[in-house]
Image: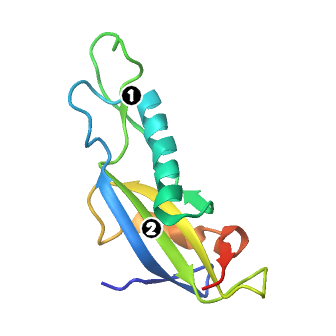
Amino acid sequence: MNSSLIIENNKEVTIKSIKQWHTYGGLLEGVPTDKMNENIIDRTKKEAKEFLGMDEIYLIEPKQKPIDFHGKYPFGNPASLPGVTCLVELWCNDVFRNTDKTFSSLCVIWFQEDYAFPIEKKILSKIKEIPFSEICGEFDY
């Protein structure tokens, strides 16, 4: 497994940590809804802040897939996210705005069908498009 990625055309970042889980691991009955999915995304952002201790978080916006349901579902509009929630901490040994700092970092959240690795190709493409140098946090060791 290669833990390095090239982003923004020439910046090398390293996946320092990764955390993954089944998106609907706690759902015991019923089907997910668009409102439930919004709550999952919000909760994942909060968990990322706690897990990594940083505010610099980038969400690759997931596409919700409508779920066919005959009749009216009483709890909202049935829709699902991909099956696995992923969050990574990307590190770079460069800084871009504050030369008094020693490294930069960013948490990236996405959803994909299976556990990484590999990271799905469409997600890798989106990671490479992130304006890392503009939105990362800059820190000292």
Q: How far across and down, in percent of the image, does residue 33 sit? A: 39, 28
Does 20 sit left or right of 45 as displayed?
A: left
Instruction: Give the quadrant of residue 104.
Output: bottom right
Q: How far across and down, in percent of the image, does residue 97 sit? A: 78, 79
| Amino acid type indicated by mark 2 | Val
How many residues crowd around disc 1 within 10 Å: few (fewer than 14), some, or many (20 or more)? many
Q: Is residue 137 above or below residue 48?
A: below
Residue drawn at point x = 21 percent, y = 31 percent? 28
Mark 2–mark 1 Cα distance, whole angstroms, equals 26 Å
Residue 88 disc label: 2
Element assignment for label 1: loop
Residue 33 disc label: 1
Instruction: Give the quadrant of residue 70.
Output: top left
How many residues crowd around disc 2 within 10 Å: few (fewer than 14), some, or many (20 or more)? many
**Between 134 and 107, the one nearer to me in the picture:** 107
**Between 84 and 51, the one nearer to me in the picture:** 51
Does 130 sit left or right of 111 as displayed?
A: right
Q: How far across and down, in percent of the image, does residue 89 sit? A: 49, 71
